[in-house]
Image (tube, grey):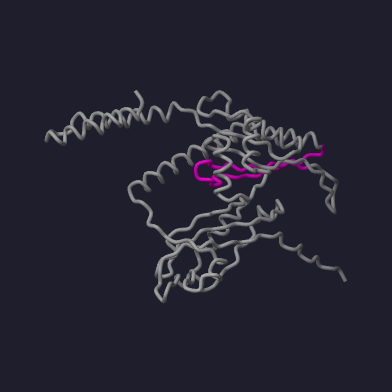
Amino acid sequence: MSGRVLFSMWRAHLARDSRAGRPGYLGLALCCLFALAAVVECQSRSINVAVLDFGSSPTGARAANAIRQILIQDDKEFAVIDKDLATAAARGSGFQGSLNLTTQEARDIGAAIGCEFYFIGDAQTLRRSPSTGPAYFESFASIFVVSARTGRLIFWERPLERRDTAGAAEQSLVQVLTSGDTRHRYQSEIRRALEDERAQRETAFEKPASLIELMSEDESVDNKDTRPPRPFRRFKPPYPEAAARAEVEAVVDVLVDVDARGEITHLEIARWAGYGLDQSVIDTVKQMHFFPAVRAGVAIPMRVLLRYNFRKPPPEAKAVSP
């Protein structure tokens, strides 16, 4: 008997016992059975995961296939959706391979695929010719794990291997991706995200979030009666070393809830980019203080969208010997 059926029975018996003035012992027993059935269903159901190819290069296809293999290896916990079906569904939703998505775009992709989590990324094998030393080959894979339910980027990494030949570099990268440590890391991140989302749903049910108006910085120009929150001073997020190594340029949007006193009560990433850029924005915004939003002369709580554009910093000028 499913948890949903038990839940319906529990509600019916609880209502009948309440009308009769009897203690709800049967209802309580059914409630316990409902909870047990829900746990069993959750444990027995496979987690649907999709892995899209990491770009159009042969390295991207091999890297993605390596991850598909480790997710289904001797484990019924994860069910990997057919590659061709997932790819067609993602393209049908408008996905063109971007690793800089809004949470809404990410949810749309997940809904089209019909999964709970999906992997996207970029993998290549490149020849490097340093100014000093011999040339070498570098194989890397930028790997993003996304929650289809929330659209959030739950995990990212960029393993990189360097070898004397292209074949050796790519083979070394595939070995890393098919290792037990990698398999355990990805599965653990997905399990953790599931638990976090379950806890957030329970919290939202017990304590619904208060409604708060959203206004972007651009909208304030057209709305003369309302002024959005304004920071006392706007700090510039640092460009992380991980992003510098990958030479990433991206946009990060963050939603910030500011109360009537100008204090931040909540913030969340609305467009993510990985490579440490999202965390750089969060850490920076947490340091900021705001003038509260004002409407008709009265301070009000408001959610504001802040946007940060990250560009590769210019190369440092090298010292010239006299």
**Which residue shows up at 66% across the image and 47% down it?**
98
**Which residue shows up at 59% across the image and 61% down it?**
307
- Across and down, in percent, residue 256 comes to 49, 61
**Which residue shows up at 83% across the image and 51% down it?**
130
- Across and down, in percent, residue 18 comes to 16, 36
- Across and down, in percent, residue 6 comes to 30, 28
**Which residue shows up at 72% across the image and 54% down it?**
247
Quadrant housing residue 306: bottom right
When the figure is inspected, residue 153 is found, relative to residue 172, above or below; the finding is below
Q: Is residue 164 magenta?
A: yes
Highlighted magenta segment, given as a residue range: 138-165
Quadrant housing residue 310: bottom right
Relative placement, left or right, of 135 versus 241 is right
When the figure is inspected, residue 160 is found, relative to residue 264, above or below; the finding is above
Foreground of the two, 151 or 145: 151
Foreground of the two, 70 or 1: 1
When the figure is inspected, residue 82 is found, relative to residue 320, above or below; the finding is above
Q: Is residue 292 magenta?
A: no
- Across and down, in percent, residue 113 comes to 58, 35
- Is most of the magenta stretch helix, strand or loop? strand
